[in-house]
Image: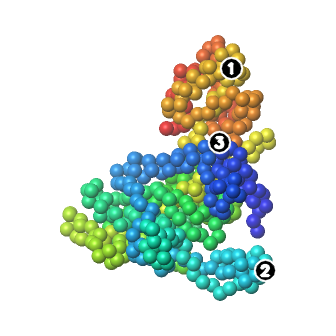
Amino acid sequence: MVDKSKNDLMSKLVSLCKRRGYIFPSSEIYGGIVSCWDYGPLGVELKRNIKELWWKSMTLYRDDIEGLDCSIMMHPRVWEASGHVQGFTDPLVDCKGCKQRFREDEAKDKCPNCGGELTEVRQFNLMFKTHMGPVEEEGANQIYLRPETAQGIYVNFSNVQATSRRKLPFGIAQIGKSFRNEITPGNFIFRTREFEQMEMQYFVRPEEAPEWLEKWKEERMKWYKDLGIKEERIRFHRHSEEELPHYAAKAYDIQYEFPFGWQELEGIHNRTDYDLKRHIQYSGKDLSYFETNSEERFVPYIIETSAGVERTLLTCLVDAYEEEDDRVVLRLSPKLAPYKAGIFPLVKRDGMPGIAREIAKKLRSRFRVFYDEGGSIGRRYRRQDEAGTPYGITVDSQTLEDDTVTLRDRDTMSQIRVKMDELTEKMEKLINY
Ligand code: ATP
């Protein structure tokens, strides 16, 4: 049984996202479109912060990973080699009564919608098809929108390795859009047909793969904990033999406890040499690696870490959402928060707005901040609490006497006084840049 209060939590979060400018239904003025969402002023900042933190942790802070940005449309043979044309399918059933479609596992022996009889199961390929160029006849110039970013990395393995003169072990990281024609998208932004992935493929000697799988498992879990995700709501799930994808020798998911249950957030897989060998076979090109020290030539194994940007974003929002007696607060980590501080003149006179604007201008060169002079100070604090802004800086009458301002902490609501010319330094420490 799904707990009703947990359902409520999702609908409250959806309306907070709309109200505060995090996420809007796509094409809303035309009635919206199923499973498509637009990221508003705060949503786009949160998304960028997530991607930035991932990118930094994968490339900037390491000396063994290169970045890449591949085309979304690729040669159709890529998807034959990868196994997607043949096997990237979900079992689908139709209701003979109301005509609605379901994934087989969601409709047992009758239609969950109207109780009607179901058709036989058939396989439905999840790849979006389109045509390249001005031909639209069936089958001609048909191409796919990529359902994962990983294949772009595999087909560029030799390009990246040779140009960056990398030796094993090393990785290639990519962030980009993927498309899957999911039969049943849903749970807000959890499962959509267009989404972004943050994928890293780590190339290793075959016998070192098990050890690297364990290392990456730990690294990735640490990344989520560093974002402030609550320990008790995140866990590993090891794939059983039946769950293992065809390409993987061993696989883990990182799961999060969403209001609708424990669900996958990221996959961490030992993909063996499956992918490179398939591309060698289908392209006829040599993608093996020559190790100069041992003078051995072999096809590397791959450890993959594959995360979703929107799923991470949903996790951060769910995890941060709290209701207190008289306020709703998003306890987003300062690293993630769209605005780092709200800047407020206590009242709109005595030169306070001018001083507050000066502070905002100065801080803006380092952080995204929000200036607000409208309404009572209490209301202004509440608005920023809901938006997840970790700090409030208020110019008041004492500022006019001693050049200090109030610095308010979103979580504890405690206030301290800070000298204006020490604000940037203080904020830098607090935000942990
Ligand atoms: P699921 O079982 O939930 O469909 P999957 O096992 O097919 O996911 P992977 O192919 O391992 O997912 O994709 C890696 C990551 O990409 C997932 O952990 C998730 O974060 C993200 N992802 C996959 N499909 C979607 C989707 N339809 N909408 C949003 N994010 C997705």
Residue depicted at 66% across the width and 19% down the height: 352
Which numbered tag is attached to residue 396? Answer: 1
- Image position of 53 with respect to 112: above or below: above
Which numbered tag is attached to residue 388? Answer: 3
Q: Secondary structure at mark 3?
A: loop
Q: Do we see residue 264 in this rendering? A: no
Q: CA distance from mark 2 to mark 1?
A: 64 Å
Q: Secondary structure at mark 2?
A: loop
Residue depicted at 45% across the width and 62% down the height: 72
Task: Identify the residue position indicated by label 2 in the image.
Answer: 115
Q: Earlier in the sequence, mark 2 or mark 1?
A: 2
Q: How is the image coloured?
A: rainbow
Q: Earlier in the sequence, mark 3 or mark 2?
A: 2
The answer to whether residue 345 is left or right of residue 53 is: right
> Around disc 2, counting alpha carbons within 10 Å, would you say few (fewer than 14), some (14 to 19), or many (20 or more)?
few
Q: Do we see residue 433 in this rendering? A: yes
Q: Amino acid at mark 2?
A: Gly
> Around disc 3, counting alpha carbons within 10 Å, would you say few (fewer than 14), some (14 to 19), or many (20 or more)?
many
Residue depicted at 53% across the width and 70% down the height: 128
Q: CA distance from mark 3 to mark 1?
A: 23 Å
Q: Residue furthest top?
A: 401
Which numbered tag is attached to residue 240? Answer: none
Tag nearer the camera, 3 or 2: 2
| Residue 350, position as x, y percentages in the image | 69, 15
Tag nearer the camera, 2 or 1: 2
